[in-house]
Image: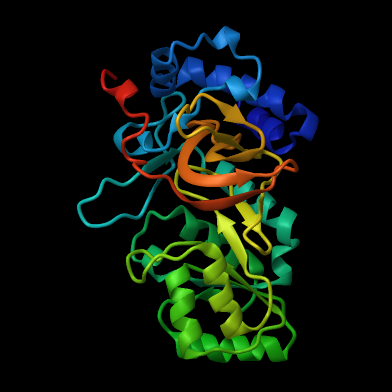
Amino acid sequence: MLEQWNHKIFGVKQGDFEATALEIFNFQYQNNLVYKAYTDALQINPASVQSIRQIPFLPIRFFKSHTISTGLFEPAIVFESSGTTGSINSKHFVKDISLYEESFLKGFASFYGNIQDRCIIGLLPSYLERNSSSLVYMVDKLIALSQNSNSGFYLYDHDKLHRVLKELEKANKKTLLIGVTYALFDFAEQFPMPLKNTIIMETGGMKGRREEMIRPEIHRLLQNAFGDLPIHSEYGMTELLSQAYSKGDGLFACPPWMKVLVRDEEDPLLIKTQGSGVINIIDLANIYSCSFIATDDAGKLNTDGSFEVIGRIDGSDLRGCSLMVAI
């Protein structure tokens, strides 16, 4: 069964995406108790759902309060979101870790080519301080597959990171430095240096270490430190098994098995295929949790499917929860 879904998900063609998404919607409605209850609470008849714009999207905060699983299984791993002390974190129960690995490996390769062609450096200290981060799992796998002795997590050792980057630049070695935003800022302040062969990829968030800033300001400051190169970004989250990437200007693109739509903030059932709104995500790789997620991120969707993330919506913790009180 898993092999059949893998082939259908990761082999999906653009023209087959909607039909595959509708098939997964019906599969999850029948086998995911929380998603079925949510769909029924909206008084949506699954038989009436004939397009992806009619599919109900599960509010992302339900991953904090419910076990979101399609079918009964013992999870191979549980990914957990970061949070402040006393907060309730989201949990993603993953049935088969190979599903996640196939998603992020094929997704990364589609944007950046062969992993072995690059040195992979992770600057993710806040994520490494816990052992349930899906981002750390992904970067750790990329590091291992890169087969480069300089690949690795550098935590707070900025002196060593500086030396290594200088060596890699001198050797004209293609390098990816992926970091949480505040850690990249800390490094940039200590060791500004021009980079020509290194991609800087921010994965968002100050994690309470610095004042939050909009993405254009973040990129401008990083460019001031590392040269006038495009700043790349990764858009992923605990509740997903796929990632979107931006190669500059904060404009994201998805792998073929992932699609972004936007919903009206006042009418969450009004789904649009372009324009401004709140981001909804279809992640076909989420076959054993929920593939249809209503995030709390405001965004702008372009006609070619690319999108921008503008920020968080106001009152995001309050919207959409009343339907689940009885569940």
The answer to whether 249 is drawn above or below residue 325 in the figure is below
Query: Looking at the image, which is closer to me, 226 or 162?
Result: 226
Image quadrant in which you'd find residue 192:
bottom right
The answer to whether 196 appears left or right of 42 in the picture is right
The answer to whether 182 is drawn above or below residue 243 in the figure is below
Q: Residue at x 42, y 76 (%)?
A: 155
The answer to whether 211 is drawn above or below residue 33 in the figure is below
Query: Looking at the image, which is closer to me, 308 or 145?
Result: 308
| Quadrant placement of the N terminus | top right
Q: Residue at x 48, y 62 (%)?
A: 204
| Quadrant placement of the C terminus | top left
Q: Residue at x 46, y 89 (%)?
A: 190
Image quadrant in which you'd find residue 8:
top right
Q: Is residue 324 visible?
A: yes
Q: In the rendered view, how is the structure colored?
A: rainbow
Q: Is residue 178 visible?
A: no
Query: x, y percentage for residue 201?
Result: 59, 68
Query: x, y percentage for residue 4?
Result: 67, 28
